[in-house]
Image (cartoon, rainbow, N blue to C red):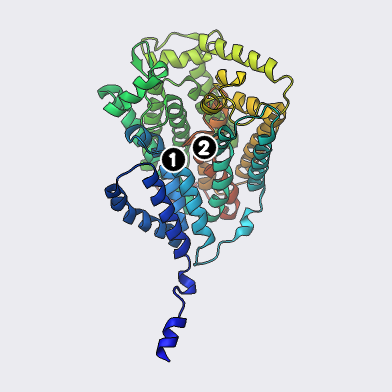
Amino acid sequence: MEQNLFYNRPLLKASDRWLIPGLLVAVFFGWLIAKKGFSIGFLLATMPFAISFVTLVFLKPRTGYISFIIYCFAVAGLGKHIEGIQFGVGQDGLLILTWLGVIFYRGKQFKFRHFNNDLVWLAVVWLIITILEIANPDKPSLAGWFFEMRSATLYWVLSIPLGFLLLNKKSDIDLFLHITIIISVLGALYGMKQLYFGVDQMENLWLEAGAKKTHILFGKLRVFSFYSEAAQFGASQAHISILCIILAAGPQSKIKRLLYLAAGLLLFYGMLISGTRGALFALVGGGFTFLVLSKKVKILIVGGAIGLAFLGVLKYTSIGSGNAEIVRLRSSLDPNDPSLVVRLENQKILRDYLSTRPFGSGVGVLGTWGLKYNADKFISTIPPDSLYVKIWAMYGIVGFIIWFSIMLYTTGKCAGIIWNTKDPVLRNKLCALCGGATGILLCSYGNEVLNQMPSSIIVYVSWVLIWLSPRWDTRLPIVNPDTSKST
């Protein structure tokens, strides 16, 4: 009798069924690593950590999402220093793993009704448009579509719903801000190491493989830190710099204000040494957004005057001309800059080419994946230089109008939510998030920024937190943090 009971007993309890997908994911990653040619020793050494992490994500899916945000900062640096591994695939893996953790989570059930909001549906709409582009009459490569789709759509549509489920506490705003600021500060410090002490051996190999054409100008290094390249490093540094400066202007204690201000200035220097001219507009866009949302005429006038004076010094004076970083930054305001002239010429060529293609030439037809998978197409030879131009070329004028409308709607609703926020401390943090996201959207006109990590995930999570913020808003008096007296 006992024996029969033993054999009829289920192998796993119902509460332990989540182990099945967890083990399957671990086995899959193990197969993937082995397929790439790693030694059995490396596989055996890393497998316990992989299984432990997978188990942790199924126990606490939030861990997977936070790990994804941190990984997005590190992925490019890992790729430069460890050959033979496609670290970019790790972003996809972490997102999918986190989704599996959410689906099979055995604790308090997630409220999937939170998916029913316009921010999620806008991402779904863009996913549908991207899928329809497979049938583009120009017949672009399916492989090119797949790899381009990941940054153009996949991370957007997968990360935003997860944010609504896993970062739904008021304290998560501080958690997210601190993660991004601390890693960005580390990025600035590592960038200074590259500038003053030189790049390491693996970074030098990356430069010699072709990157030095855009990263060593007139014998001077454009710092890239552990980011994908200098343009992304500079834009991200400007993004978090203006975010910190906005936080420093808010109702914080003196020590917090000083820390935020110090971080903001350090990150501004990180932007300068990147040599990324377009990053200036992240500061301009973010600063202007904050001034408008502050709802204080005096701050708007004074801040606007300071901003215009700064741009005026760059445009109409030669102050700082002995500094290479300032000289390059100044060239961003020069309408006759050779780089700008070339970009405008390329846009004229694209305008003629796309005049008969209202839906573009297809996803993945230009840029890195265009050269690799669509080299037979004329459009693949034209560098996009700008995310706006790339969207226009891939999706056509119809797709570009839809995408730009989504961006304007999202930015406008973020501003509307912040405008109606009563809690002054919360409003300051939301202004920082919205200002940074708007700045990235603006500087994406000059470079591909919003579709690259870590800028894209920072913007997506910023949108999510702003969307969630009305549930945390309460009318509170403005308190002086240093004297604890209401003002």
41 is higher (above) or lower (below) than 186: below
Q: Are marks 1 and 2 in contact (CB under 8 Å)?
A: yes
The structure residue drawn at horizontal position 53% and vertical position 11%, both measured from the top left corner, is 334
**Label 2: few (<14), some (14–19) or many (≥20) C-alpha neighbours in 10 Å:** many
Determine which of the numbered discs, if any, sits on residue 72 in the image: 1
Q: How many marks?
A: 2
Q: CA distance from mark 1 to mark 2?
A: 9 Å
Amino acid beneath label 1: Cys
Q: x%, y% of residue 360?
A: 68, 26
The residue pinned by badge 2 equals: 456
Front residue of this view, candidates 404 and 75: 75
Q: x%, y% of residue 304?
A: 55, 25
Amino acid beneath label 2: Ser
Determine which of the numbered discs, if any, sits on residue 85 in the image: none
Q: x%, y% of residue 233?
A: 42, 29
The structure residue drawn at horizontal position 41% and vertical position 11%, both measured from the top left corner, is 319
275 is higher (above) or lower (below) than 238: above
The structure residue drawn at horizontal position 52% and vertical position 67%, both measured from the top left corner, is 108
